[in-house]
């Protein structure tokens, strides 16, 4: 997250347990995954084992986020193919989980729940009952939406055979998340490298081999059902105990840690080297759009201009996830990286261009 | 007295076209999309606001006159329409070919504006608009011709009134369905809002227009939409004549309202098609309308 100076800020100004709140602001839609991933990296570096209850609550928060993120995507995808009714209905269904998020954490989004060492708020029995109720309505309405979408010929016409990329190419470009799973690549960090409480959860990883945009629609809808299933299991099995495990602030410097979390868009990887003065020496984030965007040119090949929005939309792009600027001279093929002062010059030139 | 009917035509259309658009938006919002939706008067506010804004443009002559040509052409078409089953002073000076020409002129004005705005998206939009215009026009023409072959006349009053005069035969039913499908393309709504396609080409032909110019184009689109809805009512709904001109107009407007409801429901339950997919639908419509005219020649 170089272009917004987040990594640099966290390496020079703040302390370990302030960073989760900054990490959460990397993405406006899937913030918890960054906070979780960062916290796990810190815990790994410090050799800290957090309480089981905190891990369960993290799992629930991540899945709540997945439900809302996939519904959001479904709405946006509807809008991109000019079907605003899907947009409005998906977002109406999504609204109840947003309200619940506000009740649980104080925020509709950017929950601020997850910190290194555990979570900040507990899920009380009343909140648990309410969450179960919310999930029930969402599941019911989502089944309706799923049926409507599966039975709508026009949606099939706009998404089937669009944005094709073969399974081999998907692996070659290292695409992640639903984009890869819609191309028959069976990867899911939750199952392959379990973290939080996912080792105890029973869930399926939907994989479709249609290799097109329609596949990503199916994968995301099925994943939302799986997310609901996971939250129910987590609420059911959640053990008692503290939600926060204190840790000494002087973590040994130069410890390396890497933590991966399955975000709604794919795999998020946080790499951390601990440093002195109670803050990381180096913190590097790789968000899922960064690898996924590399596959877009291949998906766009041989498709029409009208399909461009939905193909780019199908990877659920988050442009704050794509953090490197490279300047390519088309004629000679040389690539140069832009420095801070270059970017400053460009933005100033743009700002004053119209005057 | 005949001259007054012209004034009524123009006033009714100018006054009600934005209102019906408001109805479409409200139905889309409340009935289909579970949301509150804008006030019924919103399209009037939009146009008023745009009229008070600044005109920006590339500064060529074609760009300036395009919106005016568009609105002038659609207003001239409206003048000829026998609203309330009442031919007016000008109806006898025109025939169905005049109507088709003037409607095409409106489309050409949109293309002119798009091409003169020197914007890539506008060019893309104009090519899509052109395809739509060329391929949907025959449905409109055949609708008129269906009536014209029955009365052996190209006059507006005679040909539009005679389509359902012999009841709903097979030819009329085919034409009615073809017209209803084409209606979404005529008025530029889903699944055929391809020329404007907001997320793809950002309103296409109108992207460079602003202020009063855009207001004129918006008004043009609203009037065009109401024209096609009204034409459907005049052609395909048998005349219910009360003997009072005002009552006839009101009855027709009630039917126009129903057509708008249909436009809203169809528009909000379909995604946008790609232009190549839409072309196949249009081709089907052309064939269907030709079949309808063919059948009507044999009186079926």
Image: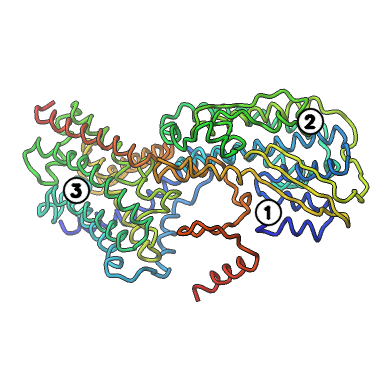
Closer-to-camera residue (A83/B84): A83
**B255 horizontally vs A272: left or right:** left
Instruction: State the residue position of label 1.
Output: A1
Residue B222 visible in image: no
Q: CA distance from mark 2 to mark 1?
A: 28 Å
Disc 3/disc 2 C-alpha distance (Å): 73 Å
Q: Is residue A3 above or below residue A147?
A: below
Residue mark closest to the camera, 2 vs 1: 1
Q: Helix, strand, or loop for circle 3?
A: loop
Q: Between marks 3 and 1, how big is the CA–CA gap?
A: 65 Å
Q: Which residue is mark 2?
A: A197
Q: Which mark is residue A171?
A: none
- Position of B127 relative to B235 (above/below): below
Residue visible at 37% across and 40% down in the picture: B274
Query: Residue B205, image x and y in percent?
Result: 35, 56
- Which chain is mark 3 on? B
Q: Image quarter for residue B288?
A: top left
- Residue occupying the point 25% across, 33% down: B284
Identify the mark nearer the N-term, 2 or 1. 1
Label 3 sits on residue = B82
Secondary structure beneath label 1: loop
Q: Are marks 2 and 1 on the same chain?
A: yes
| In this view, the mark in front (3 or 1) | 1
- Disc 1 sits on a residue from what chain? A
On the same chain: label 3 and label 2?
A: no
Q: Nearer the viewer, residue A201 or A237?
A: A201
């Amino acid at each position: 997250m170089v272009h917004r100076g987040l990594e640099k800020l966290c390496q020079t100004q703040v302390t370990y347990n302030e960073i989760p709140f900054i990490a959460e602001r990397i993405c406006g839609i899937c913030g918890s995954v960054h906070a979780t991933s960062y916290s796990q990296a810190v815990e790994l570096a410090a050799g800290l084992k957090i309480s089981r209850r905190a891990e369960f609550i993290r799992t629930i928060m991540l899945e709540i986020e997945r439900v809302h993120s996939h519904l959001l995507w479904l709405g946006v995808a509807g809008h991109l193919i000019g079907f605003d009714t899907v947009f409005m209905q998906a977002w109406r269904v999504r609204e109840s989980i947003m309200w619940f998020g506000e009740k649980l954490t104080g925020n509709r989004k950017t929950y601020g729940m997850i910190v290194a060492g555990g979570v900040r708020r507990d899920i009380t029995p009343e909140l648990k009952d309410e969450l179960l109720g919310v999930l029930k309505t969402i599941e019911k309405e989502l089944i309706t939406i799923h049926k409507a979408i599966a039975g709508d010929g026009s949606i099939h016409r706009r998404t089937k055979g669009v944005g094709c990329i073969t399974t081999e190419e998907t692996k070659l470009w290292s695409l992640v998340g639903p984009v890869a799973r819609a191309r028959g690549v069976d990867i899911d960090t939750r199952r392959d490298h379990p973290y939080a409480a996912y080792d105890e959860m029973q869930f399926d990883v939907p994989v479709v081999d249609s290799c097109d945009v329609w596949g990503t629609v199916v994968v995301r809808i099925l994943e939302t059902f799986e997310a609901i299933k996971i939250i129910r299991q987590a609420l059911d099995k959640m053990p008692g105990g503290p939600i926060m495990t204190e840790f000494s602030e002087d973590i040994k410097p130069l410890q390396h840690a890497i933590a991966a979390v399955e975000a709604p868009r794919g795999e998020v990887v946080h790499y951390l080297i601990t440093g002195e003065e109670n803050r990381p020496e180096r913190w590097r984030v790789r968000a899922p759009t960064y690898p996924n965007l590399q596959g877009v040119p291949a998906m766009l090949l041989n498709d029409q201009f009208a399909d461009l929005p939905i193909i780019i939309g199908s990877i659920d792009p988050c442009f704050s996830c794509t953090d490197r600027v490279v300047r390519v001279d088309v004629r000679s093929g040389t690539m140069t990286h832009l420095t801070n002062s270059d970017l400053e010059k460009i933005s100033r030139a743009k700002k004053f261009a119209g005057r | 007295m005949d001259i007054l009917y012209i004034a009524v035509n123009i006033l009714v259309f100018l006054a009600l076209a934005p209102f019906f658009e408001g109805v479409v938006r409200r139905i889309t919002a409340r009935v289909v999309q579970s949301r509150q939706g804008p006030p019924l008067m919103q399209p009037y506010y939009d146009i008023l606001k745009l009229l008070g804004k600044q005109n920006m443009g590339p500064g060529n002559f074609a760009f300036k006159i395009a919106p005016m040509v568009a609105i002038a052409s659609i207003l001239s078409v409206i003048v000829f329409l026998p609203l309330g089953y009442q031919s007016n002073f000008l109806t006898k000076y025109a025939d169905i070919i005049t109507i088709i020409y003037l409607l095409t002129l409106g489309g050409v004005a949109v293309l002119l504006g798009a091409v003169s705005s020197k914007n890539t998206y506008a060019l893309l939009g104009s090519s899509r608009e052109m395809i739509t215009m060329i391929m949907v026009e025959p449905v409109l023409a055949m609708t008129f011709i269906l009536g014209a072959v029955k009365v052996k006349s190209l006059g507006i009053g005679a040909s539009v009134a005679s389509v359902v005069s012999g009841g709903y035969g097979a030819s009329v039913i085919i034409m009615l369905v073809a017209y209803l499908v084409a209606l979404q393309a005529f008025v530029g709504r889903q699944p055929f809002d391809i020329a404007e396609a907001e997320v793809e080409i950002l309103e296409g032909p109108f992207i460079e227009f602003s202020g009063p110019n855009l207001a004129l184009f918006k008004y043009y689109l609203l009037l065009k939409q109401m024209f096609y809805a009204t034409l459907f009512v005049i052609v395909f709904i048998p005349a219910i004549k009360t003997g009072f001109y005002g009552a006839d107009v009101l009855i027709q407007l009630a039917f126009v309202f129903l057509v708008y409801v249909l436009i809203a429901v169809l528009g909000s339950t379909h995604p946008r098609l790609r232009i190549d997919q839409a072309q196949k639908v249009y081709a089907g419509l052309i064939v269907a309308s030709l079949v309808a005219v063919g059948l009507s020649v044999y009186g079926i």
